[in-house]
Image: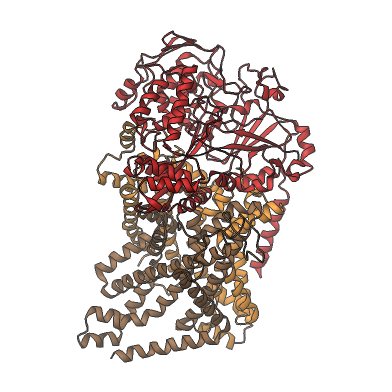
Chain colours: A orange, B brown, C red
Amino acid sequence: MNIWLYIIRKVVNMIPTLLGVCLIVFVLFNLVAPDPALLLLGKHGTVEQIAQIHRELGLDRPFWAQYFDIVKSAFTWDFGYSWSSKQEIWQMIKNGAFPSMAITVPAFILTNAIAISISLLVSFYRGKMLDKSVVFVCVAMMSIPGLAYILFGQYFFAYKLGLFEIAGYEPGFPNFVPYVLLPIVLYLIMNIGPDVRYYRTAVLDEIYQDYVRTARAKGLTEKKILFKHVLKNAMIPILTYLIIQIPFLVLGGILTESFFSIPGLGGLTIKAINTSDFPVIKAMTILSAVAFMVFNLLTDVLYTLVDPRAKLK
Amino acid sequence: MTTTTVRPNQSIWAHAARSIYKDKLAFISFVIVTVYMVMGILAFTGVIAADWSKEIGPSYSAPSADYIFGTDIFGRSVFLKAIKGAETAISIGLVTAFITVTLGSVLGLIAGYYGGKLDDFIGWIYTTISSIPGIMLIIAIAFIIGKGLTAVYLSLGLTSWVGLCRVIRGEVIRHKDREYVHAASAIGGSDMRKMFRHILPNVSHMMIINFSLTFQMAIKSEVILSYLGLGVQGRPSWGVMIDDAKLELSRGVWWQLGAATLFMFIIVLALNILGDAIRDALDPKLKGK
Amino acid sequence: MNLKKCVIAIMAASLVVFAGCTKKQNASERVLNLSSTAEIKGFDPINAGDLYSGREISKIYEGLLEFHYLKMPYTLVPNLAEEMPQVSTDGLVYTFKIRPGVMFQDDAAFAGGKGRELEAKDFVFSIKRLADSKLNSEGWWVLDGKIKGLNEWRDKNSKLPATNYDEEVEGLKAIDKYTLQFTLAKPFPQFLYSLAMPFTYAVSREVADKYGKEFLNHPVGTGPYKLEAGKFDQTKTIIYVKNPTFRKKLYPSDASPEFQNLLADAGKQLPLVDKVIVHVMVESQPAWLKFNKGELDFYGIPKDNFGTAIKDNKLTPDLSGKGMILSITPLLDVTYTGFNYENKLFQNVNLRRAMYLAYDEGKSNELFYNNTSFPAQSIVPPGIVGNMPDFKNPWKGPNLELAKKTLAEAGYPEGKGLPEITYDISDSTTSRQMAEFFVKQMEQIGVKIKIVASPWPEFMAKVKKKSVQMFGMAWGADYPDAENFLQLLYGPNKSPGANSSNYDNPEYNKMFEKAALMQDSPERTKLYEELNKFVADNVVLMYNMHRQSYTLQQSWLRNYHTSDLHHNNVQYLNIDNEVKAQSLKKF
C-alpha cells in the first residue's frame, strides 16, 4: 500500500477518536459538572444573574447544540474565552507554550542524551555489577514522588545554597535562562530513571538478536557491534519513544510549573483546575488529545518507513 | 483437556517462585511488601495506629527518643500517621490495581475473542481514553463522584486499564486459534468457558505484571492527587503529609516530608524490584536479560 | 562516544549561560519589586472583583474618589473629582465636578494616538459598562437597585442583541463637560464608597470600542502608571513605568498621628518610583524565599514561616539584622463558620451555642495564626463603627461544661440523636488543617463532623446552591462600613447573594433595613451595635477571627503601610537606592 494512502486512512481513523474525546468532554463538563453560573457569580449574586449567565454561555440551548460547539472547537481551535481570566484561550495557550518548552525541550534533550549514553554503557557491561547498580539506582530514583524532589530541590538548592532562582520567570532570551535551570535539573532527575530503563531494554533487545551472534562469530569487537549494529537497530524503538514524548513537552510539567511560577501550559492547566475554569480545561484536554493522536500517527509512519518488517496495515 | 492447558502454567509459576526466591533482592522486596501488607491490615483492623489522631506532645516537635518521627501541627505522632498512611496507600494500590486488571483483562478478552464490531467499539473506547491525558480524566472523574477514597480508587482505576487491555487483546488474538481452544470448542465448550477457563490462564502472567505496576503507580499518583486537593480526606495519607510539608519546610519541619517519603520510597522500590523480578520470571520473551 | 561528548558539551554550555546571567540594572532608576499572590484577571475595572486584580488595575485607572493615603480611619477624598460632591437635602442627588486637565494615557485608540481629556461622560459610560449584563460584571451588586433608571436600562438591554449605550439613564447624567450628576433611587449612605472602588473607575469609550473583548489587555487610564509593554500579556511578571502625561498630583502633607513618620515626601509629585515590577507568585513559599533574598520590597509573613520570623512579637535577629521592619495591621475582616438555615437542624439555637461553646478559639489562634488574630465576638471587625471593643460574647468557648449542658438542652445529650454534620471547606493545606481541628473540637461534646473539601469555585458553587450544611468562610470589607458586614445576614441577600447561611429573621431584617437607610449618626451607630449584639447572642454564625496582617518590609522601602482598601498605594511608595545597596551586602 502507498504510504500516503496509509496516512490518509490513519487520519480518517482519528475522527471517531476525536469525536469520542469531545463526547467525554461534553459529558463531563456540560452534563455532570456543577452549574457554571454558580461558579461565576461572585460573592454578591442574584437569581436574575444566574439566568443571565446561562444565556451568555449558551447553556440554555439543547444538548446537541452544546456538543456540536465542542466538536467545532476541536476542528477550528476556537475555544472561546476563559472564565477566570476572561482572556481568549487560544492566546493563553500560545503565550504558555514557550515558557513550557523553555524547560521541557532542553530538559528533554539533556535527559535523553544522558539516558541513551548510560544505557549503552551499561548494556556493554550487562549483568555485571555496574549494570545492576545503575538499574537499582534508576528504580530507586523512580520510587520517590516528584513532589518530594521539587520541595527538596527548591528549598535546598535554591534557597539554602542559593544556586538557582527560587521561582519566577522573565520572558525573552536570555532573561528566562536562570529561572528554568532548576526545573530542568528536576526534570532530569525525575525522568532519567524510566528513560535509562527503557533504553537499556531496547538495546538489550537487539543484543540478543541473531545478527549480533553472527557478528560476534565473525570476530567483530564488542564495541563495534554495539555502536555499529546494535545502536542502529535499536534506533527504531528509541525514536518511537522519543517522538511519543513530544506532546508532553508542550504540555509542560504541571507540578514543576506551579511551584516555580512558570507561566506555561502546565501551570495554566493547574490553575484552570483550581478555579474550575471549564473552557480552559476543555481546550487543554482536546488539544492534548489531538497532539497525542498526531504524534502517534507520526511514530506509526516512521515505523513503517524505517522498519521494513512492519507492514502497512 | 483442562489439565494440559494448566500444567505449562503451573511450571511457569513454580519457576517464577523459584527464581524470586533465588534472587536475594527480589526476595527481600517480597518480604518488605508482605510487611507493609500486614501493617496495612493491622492498621485497618485497628490493632496498630488506631489512636493516630491523639495528641502525644507539643506541636511540631522534632524527632527524638520520645517522638520517633516527630509530631505534626496538632502534636500528633508523625510515625503513627505514616503507618496509618500505609493502610491508605495499600488500599489505594490494591483496589486501583484490582479495578485496572479486571477492566483491562475482561475488556481485552472480549475484544480479542469476539473481534468484529465489539472489538472496534472497545478499541474506540481505549484509543479515546488513552488520547486524553490521564490527569484531566482523573480530575473530571473526581468532579463527578466527589472527593475521598472512592474517588481516588475509581479515577485511578478507570484511567489506567488501557495498556493492559491492549496487550491482552493482542495475546488473545494469538491464542484464539491455538489448538487447545479449538479442542475446547470441539467438546462443546461455551464462549465464556473458553475465554475464562482456557485462554485467561495463558495471559495471566500479564495481569500479574500489570498488577504490580499499577499498584506502585497508584501509590505515587496519590501524592499528586493530594496536592491538587483531590486526595483522600479525613485520614492520614502520605500524599497529604507531603502536601503539608509544602508549608512546613521553611519553618524547618522536615520530618513529615521525610517520614512520608521514606515510607513510600521503601514500598515503591520494593514493588518495582519485585515487579521486575516477576516480569523476568514470567515473560518468556524477556528471559535471560 | 559521540553522544557522550554531546552531553558534556550541552552541560558545559548551560553552565556558561548560567554563569553569564547576572542581572543588570540602572543604578539611579528606582524600581519597586512587589508580589501578587493571585493571578491577575486582566485590566478591566468592572472585573476587579478580587483584591489582587483591583490593586493592579488601580495602578493604571482611577476613580472619582479615593481613600486618603495617610488617614485612619478611612477617609474619602476627591481624586478625579475636583472636590467632594454636593448632595441634595433628601440625600438622593449627588453632583460632582470633574477635575479639568486630566488626560487619558496615549493610545492608538485616540485620534493621533494622543490621549484626550477626561470628561463627565466617561463616568456615565464606565458606570453603564458596569451595569451591562452582557459584560457580566462581578461588581454589579455595588449599584444594583441604587441609581434611578439604571436597573431598567440593564434589563431592557439584556434582551437586545447589542447594548445601547446612547440611551440615557435618568439617574446618571453628564450635565456639561465637567459636571456629573447621580440621582439615587433610594437613600444609600454608602454610595460614595462605591465611587472609590475599582468597579467604577473611569475608562474611555474609544478604547473599549477599539479593543472589544481584548479591552482587558489594553488598559488605558488616567493613572500614575502604564504597562511597559503597552499591553498585558498575562505574564507572571508585570512591569509598569511612569505615565508621562500624569496630571499634577502631590504626596499628601497631612496625616493622622500614626502616620506622621510617613511625611518625608510630602508635597512631592507622584508617583515616586520610576518602575514597578509585580511578580505573580501563587505559592507562598517561593515568594517568602524571594523576599528573604531582598528581591521583594515587602511581603506578608506566611503562617508557616512565622516561627522563624517572629519571636515574642519581635523580629528574629536574623531578619532584623538585615534591616527588615515589621508592621502589624488589623484587617477589616471576619472569618466564620456558617450554618445553612435552610436545614431545620440549625434553627435550634442551643445546638449552635453548644458548638460555639465547645470551640477553643485561643488554641486555633495559636495553631493557625501564631496568636496574631483577635478572636471574634460578633460579626463587625474592630476599626469599623459598630464594633464594640469591650463586648464579650457569652457563648464563646471554650467552656465544655456549658457546651455539654447546652447540647443537652438542644435535645441532643452527648450528641445522641444528632446526625453526622458535613462541614464544607475550600481546599487548601491550611483550611484542611483548620477543619481537622474543628472536627477534634466537636468530638469533645459528641458532635460528629465530616469534612468535605473542594476547590474554591466548586465550594462557592455548593454554597450558592445551598447544598452545604456547615461551611468555613471569611468576609473582607468592600468598604469600611458595618453595613457591609451586617448585610451578610440580611434575609433578602440569601444565596446566591452574600448571605451564604441563608439566615432570614424578620426582626433582624427590619432593624437592618432601617439602619441601611440612615446617614452616619450616633443613632445609626447604636442600631449597628444592637444588630451586632443580636447576631452574637443568637450565634447566627460561629464568629472565629478578625485577622491581622504581619507584613515585613525591607529597610529601603519608604512610605509603606499595610491596608486592605488603599488599592492605589503604589504611587506613594518610594525606594532609597543607597540604603538598598548598603543593606543588600548583609543578605
Nearest the eye: C348 or C332: C348
Nearest the eye: A305 or A247: A247
Nearest the eye: C337 or C253: C337
Q: Is residue C46 visible?
A: no
Side of C459 relative to A255 (left or right):
left
Residue drawn where x is 45% and y is 69% of the image: B44
- Residue A300 place in picture, x, y as percent: 42, 65
Residue drawn where x is 42% and y is 48% of the image: C423
- Residue A188 place in picture, x, y as percent: 60, 61
Q: Is residue B90 visible?
A: yes
Residue B239's place in the image compared with C332, above or below, is: below
Residue C179's place in the image compared with C104, above or below, is: above
Side of C240 relative to A282 (left or right):
right
Residue A191's place in the image compared with B19, above or below, is: above
Residue B175's place in the image compared with C372, above or below, is: below
Side of B38 relative to C317 (left or right):
left
- Residue C154 place in picture, x, y as percent: 34, 24
Image quadrant holding the N terminus of chain C, namely bottom right
Residue drawn where x is 64% and y is 35% of the image: C328
Q: Which corner quadrant of the image does residue A46 belong to?
A: top left
Image quadrant holding the C terminus of chain C, namely top right
